[in-house]
Amino acid sequence: MSGVNRRYFVTERLAVGYDGVPLIRDIEIEIGQGEIVTLIGPNGSGKSTILKSITRQLKTLSGRVLVAGEELQKLSYRALSTRMAVVLTERMKPELMTCRDIVATGRYPYTGRLGILSAADEAKVEEAMAAVQVAELSDRDFNATSDGQRQRVLLARAICQEPEIIILDEPTSFLDIRHKLQLLSILRSMAKEKGITVIMSLHEIDLAQKISDRVLCVKGDHISLAGRPEDIFSEAAIRALYDISAGSYDPLFGSIELPRPAGEPRTFVLSACGTGIPVYRAMQKANEPFAAGILYENDVDCRLARQLASEVVTERPFAPIGDAAFERALALMARCERILDAGVALGACNRRMGELVDRARQMPGYEKV
Amino acid sequence: MSQNLSPASARFRRRARYELVFVLLVVALAVITVLNVNIGSVPIPVGEIARILLRRATDSAQYSIIWKIRLPRIMMAMLLGGALSLSGFLLQTFFGNPIAGPFVLGISSGAKMVVALVMIFFLDRLGRVSSFALIVAAFFGSLMAVGFILLLSRRLKHMAVLLVAGIMIGYICNAVTDFIVTFAEDSDIVNLRGWSLGSFSGMSWENVGVAAALVLIAAALVFLLSKPIGAYQLGEAYAQSMGVNIRAFRAALIALSSVLSATVTAFAGPISFVGIAVPHLIKRALNTSKPIVVIPATFLGGAVFCMGCDLIARTAFAPTELNISTVTSVFGAPVVIAMMLKRQKGR
């Protein structure tokens, strides 16, 4: 794309906090037009404080914020309002206002002294409501809407303001999974089709990973990590960011797992190509430590087994099963009280798995799942 | 309900509703004005009113009654009723609470206290007191009470607590006022007693002129603020993001609501419940809280409400006159209770 401002929103050595006490310092952000940037981090880490500071609800303590090259603190409220729109977490309870009334307030910067909407303004209101699929709520009282509808109405309000940048504070909280997906896909198409820059905070790291062009991790008194999701989402980074001591996070799919059952394995699970997953989960729920094998490193079972099993016997992808793995699996099976056979698909390279299953059948604890 | 209406026809229905409410208010205003001129210790037939006024027979008793007693009183009830309701509406917007008003927040009582002090001071030294001095006194009294509430509101985040604080401020100011009245000269007390309980009686055209100038200018300014008020109804943060300069706006709200309620207190004493009940009834009737329609309707509604209450105060137990607050409380308090019950249910 040509003509896109790669430095649309910039902060330089920004420090934010309350009552003159800096909470987070040295915030250096550089965001281009049409980019989606997400702040993640534990509760109370200061995500909202940053968002409040860059929307001017909170005075910045030091450093600069530049919007399209102009300094935020020097812009008039009015000039800023035609560039930046917000969707906030605080729950409002307006009196006797329809959803349409709420959306129409987005036209504020464009109407005259008394705020009367022109036909063009009315059209914009309708357009914005249609874009987030709330047109049918037009005459409904805002207080009589569900959380999902409410968030979309507020987003329509922000869109109606025709901003260049939208800032959202935890827009997906309180929403069910369907509405989360709906809201985020609306944001994505806004960013990519209309070139609107989006800055938001999210609690759902899996969604943050999937929607964001860039992610900022807020921890302690600074931005601990910043970059493209594929670069920064590692098991270790997430573990450190949220201080996770129990359970685990799989950066590939953005999934989280509860902690693995502790102790020596008493059960051995034989599986391949996904047949083991329901068995692992059942063992995890029963808090039974288990071992799994022999799994190719590229098997889906292997990804989960590494997070849930006490021991995993693995083999390199597509290689014939070697003696070392075979002997280790046998030894483990011999020590276990139960051997669960979840079903193993046999092919040219894993022929020895058939042999392993045969040996298992002769052992006392063998069960076919 | 109107779920399937097209946006255009829904808009048309809303407009029709607004127009109906305004027409009804204007008709009510006209009817009550005529009734107010008509009814009294000396009844003046409706047909006669225009003739008496047009003939300008300054020497006739009827002309004097209409021109010197009833009309100024009617005008005052109209202006001050509108001012009081508008002041309530502004305070409700400011605090984001429908139960806020100049009376419950102790603002009227603050004004009353300072006015009582000034009145006694001037009456003692000069034997008279100008309405201008009273208004200035009331304005400072109001600002003092508001300032105190604002100070408290920094610490008390909970709205209910703030209202209780307002009521307490009211009690303190009333106690001081009672103290002053108790030790005032006998000749002052007559004046002070009637006024401190609230009344529209004894208004002169000079009073009407001063009140009209203040109230109409303030009301016009409030109307011009309807756009930011609408934004502020979504909360401070949203209003700011739409381009409202919050500091200036909040200062304007407080100044205007104080001028309005101070004018009322200076002339008619503290009047209860109008500031809460009228904006609420008007919003219900219009089925919206859009300031651009609510502001003028609230002003008209307050005028009608106070003129009606004054009519009752004057005539219900004639020749004994009731305090205006007695009547406004009888009608206003149930509205407030109904409103609170409804809110509770809505939760």
Image (spheres, rainbow, N blue to C red):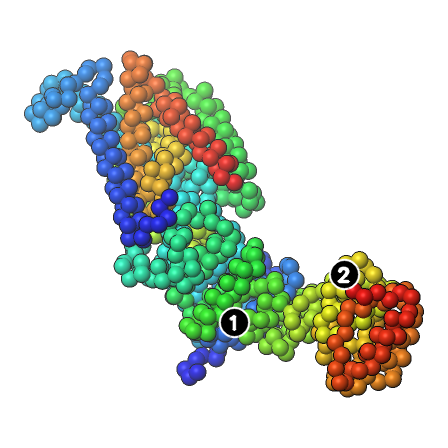
The residue most toward the bottom is: A319
- The residue labelled by disc 1 is A36
What chain letter is assigned to the residue under label 1? A
Local SS, label 1: strand
Q: Decide if residue B255 is in sight here.
A: no
- The residue labelled by disc 2 is A282
- Which of the two labelled residues, at mark 2 and mark 1, occupies the earlier sequence position? 1
Q: In the rendered view of the protein, which quadrant contains the N terminus of chain B?
A: top left
Q: Where B257 sits versus B120, above or below?
A: below
Q: Residue at x 23, y 37 (%)?
A: B23
Q: Residue at x 36, y 23 (%)?
A: B327
Local SS, label 2: helix
Q: Residue at x 75, y 69 (%)?
A: A276
Q: Using a 10 Å C-alpha cutoff, classify the residue at mark 1 as few (fewer than 14 neighbours), some (14 to 19) or many (20 or more).
A: many
Q: Nearer the viewer, mark 2 or mark 1?
A: 2
Along the horizontal axis of the image, is B213 left or right of B265?
A: left
Residue A11, image x, y percentages: 53, 73
Q: Amino acid at mark 2?
A: Ala
Residue A114, image x, y percentages: 30, 53
Quarter-of-image position of residue A316: bottom right
Along the horizontal axis of the image, is A236 left or right of B103?
A: right
Q: Amino acid at mark 1?
A: Ile
Quarter-of-image position of residue A307: bottom right
Front position in the image: A135 or B243? A135
Q: Residue at x 77, y 58 (%)?
A: A285
Residue A231, image x, y percentages: 63, 78
